[in-house]
Image (spheres, rainbow, N blue to C red):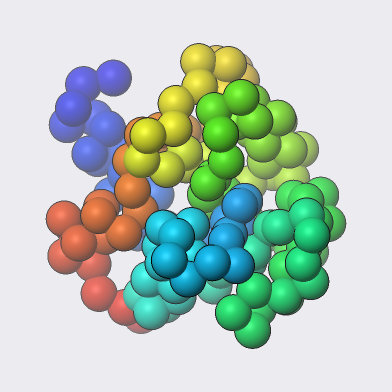
Amino acid sequence: MAATDKAELIADILRRTRRAAVVGFSTDPAKAAQRVPLRMLRHGYEVVPVHPTVSEVVGLTAYPDLASVPGALDLVVVFRPPREADGVAAAAIAAAAGAVWLQLGITSEAARARCAAAGMDYVEDACVAIELDCLGLGPLS
């Protein structure tokens, strides 16, 4: 995919997303895995934490896995190691999510191939917060 194609895909995903599950939403305020989802909230996205060991993160109901999240998901944002990305992609496909997004520093050939085979939009090695700033996207209307 060419750089402009990736930029266009990122812009399209961020503009159409309303509800996003964040797999690996951290309970630690010092981690990007909490700061980025909070930034998404401030931009007006509905954010659903997915965390296997807590029932709440920053006042939001957390779910142990994607299969437990009720309702439709436009986007699944992944803050997990690359070795877990393919499993998360499989769960996102099973949940009929609109897209999978692996955060900055996370890539997975297997997840990329799985999403491509399913016809699902896929972004890797990119930060949602940075991309929101680059696009100048303010709160959703």
- The residue at the point 56 percent across, 34 percent down is 81
Task: Say if 127 sits above or below 140 in the image.
Answer: above
Image quadrant containing the C terminus: bottom left
- Is 72 situated left or right of 111 in this image? right
| Residue 125 image position (x, y, % from top left) | 36, 34
| Residue 78 image position (x, y, % from top left) | 54, 45
| Residue 48 image position (x, y, % from top left) | 63, 66
- Is 13 situated left or right of 23 in this image? left
Image quadrant containing the N terminus: top left
Tell which of 38 and 114 is nearer to you: 38
Q: Confirm whether residue 19 shows in the render.
A: no
Residue extending furthest toward the right: 68
Q: Quadrant of residue 44?
A: bottom left
Q: Confirm whether residue 65 shows in the render.
A: yes
- The residue at the point 25 percent across, 74 percent down is 138
Q: Quadrant of residue 55?
A: bottom right
- Is 67 situated left or right of 137 in this image? right
- Is 45 situated left or right of 87 in this image? left
- The residue at the point 47 percent across, 42 percent down is 101
